[in-house]
Amino acid sequence: MDIIVCLKQVVDPELPQTEFAIEPATGRQVREGRPLVISTYDENALEVALQLKDRGGGKVTVLTLGPQAVISDAFRLALAMGADEMVVVDDPRGPDRLGGEKAAILAAAIRRIGRFDLVLTGCESADWTERVVAPVLAEALSAACVTFVSRVEAADGTLMVRRMADEGFHRVEVRLPAVLSVASDESNRPRLPKLKDILAAKRKPVHVWPVADMPAAPGDLAAGVEVREVVIPQRTTRCEFLEGESAEQAAALAQRLRDLKLL
Amino acid sequence: MAPTREVFWNIPRLGVVIMYLLAFAAVAVCGYGVYQHYRTWRRGKPASRLTPVGPRLRAVVVHVLAHGRLLADRVAGIYHAALFWGFVFLFAGTLVVFVHQDLGLRIMQGPFYLYFQSAALDLMGLAAAVGVAAALVVRYGLGSPRLRRGILSDALVLWLFEGILVTGFLVEGLRIAGTRDPWGPWSPVGYGISGLIDAAAISEATIRLGHAGLWWLHFLLAMVFIAYIPFSKLFHLVLAPANVYLQPLVNPAAPGRIDFDKAERFGAAALGDLTWKDLFDLDVCTECGRCTAVCPATATGKPLSPMHVILDLREEMKRTGTGAAPGRVLAGDVIAPEALWACTTCMACMEACPVFIEHVPKIVEMRRHLVMEVAQMPDTMEDALRSLEARTHPFRGAGISRAAWAEGLAVKKLPRGDRAEWLLWVGCAAALHERNHATLRALVRVLDAAGMDVAILGDEETCTGDPARQMGNEYLFQTFARQNIETLDRYGVRKIVTLCPHCYNTFRHAYPELGGHYEVWHHTQVLARLVDEGRLALTGSAAATITFHDPCYLGRHNGEYDAPRHILQALPGARTREMAQSRQKSFCCGAGGGLYWMEDRTGQRINHVRTDHAVATGAEIVATACPFCTLMLEDGVKARGTSIRPMDVAELLERSLRGEHH
């Protein structure tokens, strides 16, 4: 099975809050001087792809979109983990584009890669959390789509997948080609690469394609969304004292919690 | 007539011939056994341990002749010394007989015969007999908890010893009685026995018969002893002094270097990936159990016993011989990975080992295999290493930035263009944990008060790579080391002071191998010197009872026990109390070897137990000199709900400087 995994580079989501900053003029997140990592669930998606390859063979290509200059060492990790090659769509504006727009560019890149049976993405990115790339990609590629997939098993030309649900999960059979967005699960904890794979990753092919070479994306997929303002939420705490005897306080507390829909 | 004796009294010429034949046979069996071992050691990789000769010989004098480490266990040390020196004298006596009889150099006569060959040998033989008896009593009478292993083979060896000594004395007594030896009283034990024989009025024929029988028994036991050496723990008679000589003279905890441009295998998968010295170590072990008795992992119920690591490896070496039988994977088949991951690399085992076996480097070599070849390690440790790669520190989820602690302090920063004589290397455990910010700020104030010119790297500081190294990812360690050396050299850093013993150890021992040469000081060393030079006005009362917890990487790894104590003693009004396990015998806080990042779920938590040790002194403050120790003890104090306060030495010093009462 030939699998393409879309990886997004984000500012380390575990960075201390004090390091998180937004440029007031542009509304873009400040990336300079911050550690850049592969977005959390994207690593789970890669792990799923590698497990499918381990079991059934095939090829795993990782695809990313962003300024080529900064997409470097961190993404060697993906090759070290076992991806066969990497395609970087060199796009200085990449980090600032919205999901739909990105999906359209990624779809063009995937068409250029050519053969694929399966495209995997993380279920949501660690920065914008839009959750739209997978469905828009599926639409653009005319492929089946399942989101929030926790487990995948290849079964004779189709896939049996678990889709996370509010209570329990759905079992879904998917025909190929398909686009799945992957959630984290104990079965897809990203593997630790072996040192010989880390060393070998330095010799694996990395293709850099300028974003300008991607055929213009169909406008309607990305249209209709515009970012007006980006702010860092202010966390405030408020303390409220409940009056009365213990029993009255307990009753009042229960009522307050119900009002807040916490009970 | 000059005092002497007939060597082969009562032994016919044919008997003497048979004796020589049997002696050759025994020596041949011994030689064959030694050669078999030698062939297995040769499976190991090279290691150079023969020079420098001077300090190595000095170590042999201290730890073999003077029983340095053996005496750490007073009782065992004394009875071992008795039987050791007893047998050394008796062996020397046998050599004298050899020279006298076989080489024909008549040395066994005159005063030498009386003072040495008779009196000294008799008394030393008696000492040996008492020593062996004590060893038997400790094992089988008192049931020493650490001497549980090899309890049957120990019995064999000890009774063999005792048999040789007792028959020797009996033979001597019978000879003195049978020959009416005029010099008999010079051999007090034998003379005493001859007195008993005289008193019993035994006939001369019976004396001769008894003498001949016991002479042969004595001789045969001695030959069994010689032949048995390479096949039993007796081998340590030869190997232990050799191993003392071959010990690592500097930085004993360090695993072997890996040159990643050339290496094809990373770490120890099989015995052949260890050095010959590592394999030699395995045969040296006498199963005395001192290592396991002091291991904090063993003490808290973890699945690690350093002695059994050595013995299980030895079993594998025996099984595979010179490599004909297929070897098993060390980490997994021979040693449980859980055991390897329970080691805090605290060096208690190596410090306790009287024969200088190197447990820790072997454990790290096997970890290297797990991490770099198999890519398997505890999840939380893996997270730490991923964090290290992604954000240059191993503290996943740390909610503060590296330079936050210095806010509001006028500290020079090299990246801003400041220059200073000293670099203060902060270390991640101090910079990224708020508890340690107080220590850092205190340290900076003290250094400032003493007029020291210090700068920090701020956001350009990264991990030294040490956690990666201890966990077994040498590659990641070297990546960090090279980057840091590049940064330090770019700013022309020459002198480094750090409050993290792990960083200190890394700069001091690991960076020079990679081309980073700096003058490195631990903050307690700098502070002790400032106190000595009178550069700090310690005016404020620090009246409190303080106990000091030795950080392993400051103490056992680098031999610095005095600097922090020196500071504490200089605090006006402070009283210090030692924990039962302190200095060389200090008990780890549980964080070393990368175990800060492992969930300590099995058995008791090491830091809780160490907190109990501190509480037991009755001290109000447990002082330490390592940001990891501080965090671990803080956690222990919370868990135990006690009132003892963990504080860094620098904090205490600063309070006394400001005159604060606490």
Image: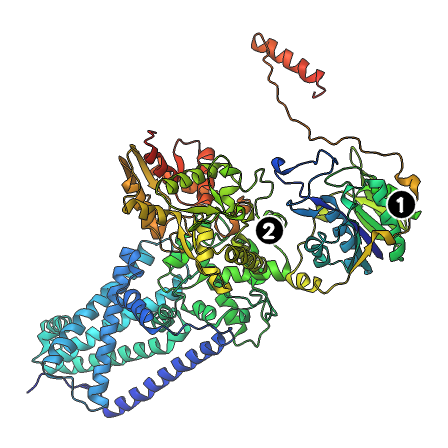
Instruction: Measuring from the top left, give residue B109's x and y in whole percent.
Output: 12, 84
Secondary structure under badge 2?
Answer: helix
For this rendering, which residue is in front, B548 or A234?
A234
Q: Is residue B150 left or right of residue B93?
A: right
Which mark identifies residue B392? none
**Residue B620 can be seen, yes or no:** no
Quarter of the image with the N terminus of chain B is bottom left
Q: Amino acid at mark 1?
A: Ala
Quarter of the image with the C terminus of chain B is top left
Q: Is residue B614 left or right of residue B256?
A: left
Image position of B102 with respect to A61: above or below: below
Instruction: Measuring from the top left, give residue A7's x and y in whole percent.
Output: 76, 49
Q: Amino acid at mark 2?
A: Leu
Instruction: Measuring from the top left, give residue B464's x and y in whole percent.
Output: 52, 53
Instruction: Indicate the chain on which mark 1 is placed.
Output: A
Q: How far apart, in angstroms, are the residues tagged by discs 2 and 1?
A: 36 Å
List the residue tagged with mark 2. B385
For this rendering, which residue is in front, B531 or B85?
B531
Mark 1 surroundings: few (<14), some (14-19) or many (≥20) residues within 10 A: many
Image position of B192 with respect to B10: above or below: above
Q: Is residue B64 left or right of residue A70?
A: left
Which mark identifies residue A138? 1
Secondary structure under badge 1?
Answer: helix
Instruction: Indicate the chain on which mark 2 is placed.
Output: B
Q: How many marks?
A: 2
Look at the numbered discs 2 and 1 and tell me whether their residues touch, using CB distance below 8 Å. no
Mark 2 surroundings: few (<14), some (14-19) or many (≥20) residues within 10 A: many
